[in-house]
Amino acid sequence: MKKRTVIVLIALVLVMALAVSGCTPKEQPAANGQDGAKEEKIKVGFIYVGPVGDAGWTYAHDAGRRYLEEHLNVETTYIESVPEGADAERVLTQLAEEGNKIIFATSFGYMDPVINVAKKYPDVIFMHCSGYKTADNVGTYFGRIYQPRYLSGIAAGYKTKSNTIGYVAAFPIPEVIRGINAFTLGVRSVNPDAKVKVVWTNTWYDPAAEKDAAISLLEAGADVIAQHQDTPGPQQAAQEKGAFSVGYNTDMKQFAPQAYLTAPVWNWGPYYVEVVKSVMEGTWKSEQYWGGMADNIVDLAPLTELVDEEAKKAIEEKKQEIINGTFKVFRGPIKDQKGELKVKEGEEMTDAEMLQFDWFVEGVEGTI
Amino acid sequence: MFVLKVAVEMKNISKTFADVVANNDVSIKVKAGEIHVLLGENGAGKSTLMNILSGFYTPDSGEIFIHGKKVELTSPREALKCGIGMIHQHFKLVNSFTVAENIIMGNGNSALRLDMKAGIEEIKKVSQEYGLQVDPKAYIWQISVGEQQRVEILKVLYKGADILILDEPTAVLTPQEAEGLFETLRKMAKKGCAVLLITHKLDEVMEVADTITVLRKGSVVGTVNKADVDKRKLSEMMVGRETFLRTGKIDNHPGEELLTLDRVTVLNDKGIKALKGISIGIRRGEILGIAGVAGNGQKELAEVIAGLRKAEDGRILLRGENITGLSVFDRINRGISYVPEDRLGKGLVPGMNIQENLVLKKYRSAAFSRGAFLKISKIREASREMIEKFDIQVSDMYSPVKFMSGGNLQKTLLAREVSDTPDVLVTSYPVRGLDIKAMESIYDLLIEQKRRGCAILFISEDLDALFQLSDRIAVFYGGQVMGVLRPEQTDINEVGLMMMGSKKTGVA
Amino acid sequence: MKTRIVLEKVCVPKRRQLAYRILAVVLALVLGAAFLGVMGFSPMAIYRKMFGGAFGSKYGITETIVKTIPLMLAALGVSVAFRMKLWNIGAEGQLYMGCFAASWVALRFPGLPAYVMLPAMFMAGMLGGGLWALVPAVPRALFGTNETLSTLMLNYVAILWVDYLVFGPWKDPKGFNFPITPEFSEAAFLPAFGNSRVHIGLVFGVLIAAVLYIVLKYTKWGYEIRVIGESREAAEYAGMKVIKNILLVMFLSGALAGLAGMAEVSGITHRLQSGISPGYGYSAIIIAWLSRLNPWGIIVVAFLFAGLLVGGYSVQTIGLSASIATMLQGMILFFVLASEFFTEYRIKLVRREGVKNGE
């Protein structure tokens, strides 16, 4: 072997050793070969209100984050279980400090902190899920989950024998009320005698409390349980009591295979890709995004074999109508709990009205 | 005469707690069939030694032989297996259980099913054998302190102990009960048991002991036969100098009545009448002794005078003024001092230092406070003076008083209570648990106050002390005054009988 | 050879106590490192991040201080009650009632100028927490009911009361029905230092610690509190007014927790919202305990505790999940609490025969 080659080799090894030891642990070795060759990856941060393993809301967002990582050359970071109080602002600041160019804040309570931090970091894009405040570098996004909720209501309406359906709900905020109303309209479109009983848990993530709430509904005669919660607790309760269930957030079949019918689910991935792409290309603009089934940001999870053929057909039909825009969930006539006509025949509720829902439609049993 | 076998031999035992040497190279031999008294002042190391023998403490070094065999006593259970049983000063009985249950339950080796009937038979047998009268079916809370002690003794006998240790057993007994106990101990010795008795009362020693080992400051001073010594010799061994056993008293002709209780009725904590309309008076410069078995209203008497307990009926007069409805605070200001039975926890605050304790009643006065603030340096100064004047041994003015010895605690308490030159001083068992030296200084203090003209209520269980100090003795039984006697006109036997409830007509 | 474990109560010098605590933290970190290593993380990187997140930058330190403020105030409150052996576990609820009362002032009189508004909110916060603490204090003082349970239970009542308000009558009409009140007027914002979120509540905390220290050490009232705490019997014997002091001290204890709540709504969130405290009132109990109820100690321990919490979030950015971060925090806390035991006791191994051969 030539002496020269040996020296070069040794030098190379030394340089590599230096380079490796100089690496801070923050940099993932996954992309080492391309370091320097390509321009730096864009960093995207996520802040979650629950743990990524909740099988619900946060899990769905994290699935979107993983989808984003697979489909774009980006580096993502997330911080989970961040309470909506004083901590949120610090965590957002930290994400901005660490060079994240886009930060997705995935809970309503992060609204004020997002606006505050966005002021200090004008070069960072903040996307706040489910809020209503925007700024030059703050956009909001949300999905019309009420559309698949309406469809899941059809499944429940066909399934119920006792004509009593239980609904375990988190907090009496417009998002949840809207979901209950859409679900109830779906139920009563195929089963006008059915009622939807609502129990509030005042939690988003409390498996035990949510399960207990479901049990109380089952004991009150419900034979189908739906939920607006971030854990599969109600699903399990339904299975244990031999009833049926409609999930939420993600496909929850694995938690209650003998009870589970379907679930309105979030599909954040493609939207996240779209947003990040637009930022990379410089076309991003602050907006209030509210996508529906047509945009594929929300969907109905596959119907299980527990759903009757007749129901399957009705759901499929309505789904197509929603996607092509011929059917609107909140189109009149819609009456409230007292039987008063709230939306006249042929009229449709506006987005602004839907965003401020504070009444229940006819057929809901419960108080706000 | 046959030679008694050695039942217990402790060789070169040493035990140190933190920095205190409790036992230093102690060796003793106790023979089966004898009553062996361990004599010494408080803190001489008697209790430590016995706690080692009964397995509560492990010695730092030394060896123990039981009936000639070397043993390792790592726990009370282990000790019991070797036949060693200890009767503590504070009884370890379950109040809501019966006598029989207490005796049998403690028996660790009992099977799943308890044979109560056989147990009771066995207890009856043992109690007859040793003259320990007690009803096996009675509940502990129903029986007297003396009976409870018998239960404790039965408990260890029932478990087959032949080496008995008793830690100051007579402290809670009347003279008659104590006599009964000694009778039992003699019977046990006769049956071949080795009896170890801890005490610091010389009279008892002379009455009951066969052999005496005197301890001082953790070491053995000597082991003697009772026949070879007298009280004077023993007390010399105990304190390391000749003590002056006080006789007679200072008679300074008591003056007018300072404190009067007029048909006072008081309830105890359970709502039962503890004082039933008693009337007594104390005069200036007089010590009124209160004799009685503990629990016959003495505590309530002290508390009703101090204002800590409400009088249900009757009046309390101080210098003729009705103070029945006044608060504790007002009574302190009017010159009533109180040395409670509970030194640590009531009379003194355990976790606070001596300075803070010395101003417990005076921190509000102009001498020690200005506005909301305390005068810290004034308090320190005054404390120094009091510590010196009352000869209190303090290693650190800032360490909590709970680390002080009993004698120093009592001196601290008394120093505070008398420093205000009170008109009335109530003292409950002021020398309980103190050694001779400390006792003497406390008595000196009381006599000094008497000389000054203070009216002193002196509650005590020590009849010798009552006879020596008191101008008059009021005997309490069941919340009533059985009689008020002049010590020179009565004797211990008469008082002892009255403590058991016999009434004396004609009041001194 | 058989041995036996013996516990002995000992008096450990102060310097040694400190050494034990430091040793405990080190042990926890070493054990945590082993645990992290097994999980496939680099312990050094995580510790560096944890420390750096809380204390490593100016921003980190200011944020740690932001978190210190409510912890410190609530812990000071808890410590006053604990001094008297009143086991006030209700700081969380008292904090919420402080939030409530201060928010009431801010929302009811939005037009007040800051120099009226802030003192009014200050008073209201203290009054809210203080009166709430009096609810269990009265039966405790008069009938001796167990305050541990009653204060604890009242936490839930207070939290749900605030929930009721933000979901119901106090809901921001422009808030799309979300559980928040309208933002306060700017006069109701506690002034902050420079660009940071550190607000003047820090000054309250330090001042109150100083005042408490002086009160406890140099005043008649402080003396009474200490005597009653050490021995109620001795206090009664000395003619102190025990009942009055129980009520006063519980009021003060609640008032300080209430002040923590006021500082949080006025200094940080600028509105009342549900879940405003992530358990500050409970952490305060641990802090008060660890600092041995010493006011200065509370400032230090609260700061370190806040750092532990802040650092816990930081490490998530390098891939540690929240639950592992919480476990790590728990581990450190556990060791420190356990070390407290060794400041009072010593464990001795004794050979079975109970005799030490002279070595």
Image (cartoon, helix red, strand yellow):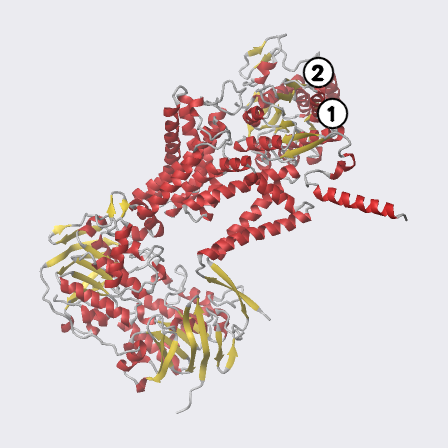
As rendered, which of A227 and A43 lies closer to the eye?
A43
Q: Residue furthest right?
A: A1
As rendered, which of B238 and C115 lies closer to the eye?
C115
Check the picture and name the quadrant holding the C terminus of chain C: bottom right
Which amino acid is tagged 1?
Answer: Asp
Residue neighbourhood size for the residue with mark 1, other residues' Cα within 10 Å, grouped as few (<14), some (14–19), many (≥20): some
Mark 1 or mark 2: whose residue is earlier in sequence:
1
| Residue bearing the label numbered 1 | A308
As rendered, which of A7 and C63 lies closer to the eye?
A7
Q: Distance from label 1 to label 2 (Cα)?
A: 21 Å
Which amino acid is tagged 2?
Answer: Ile
Q: Which quadrant of the figure has residue A365?
A: top right
Mark 1 or 2, closer to the camera: 2
* Residue pictured at 50% horizontal, 55% vertical: C19
| Residue bearing the label numbered 2 | A322
Residue A325 horizontal side relative to residue B349, left or right: right
Regarding residue A277, the answer to whether it shows in the image is yes
Give residue B453's position: percent from left, percent from top: 13, 61
Residue neighbourhood size for the residue with mark 2, other residues' Cα within 10 Å, grouped as few (<14), some (14–19), many (≥20): some
Q: Secondary structure at mark 1?
A: loop
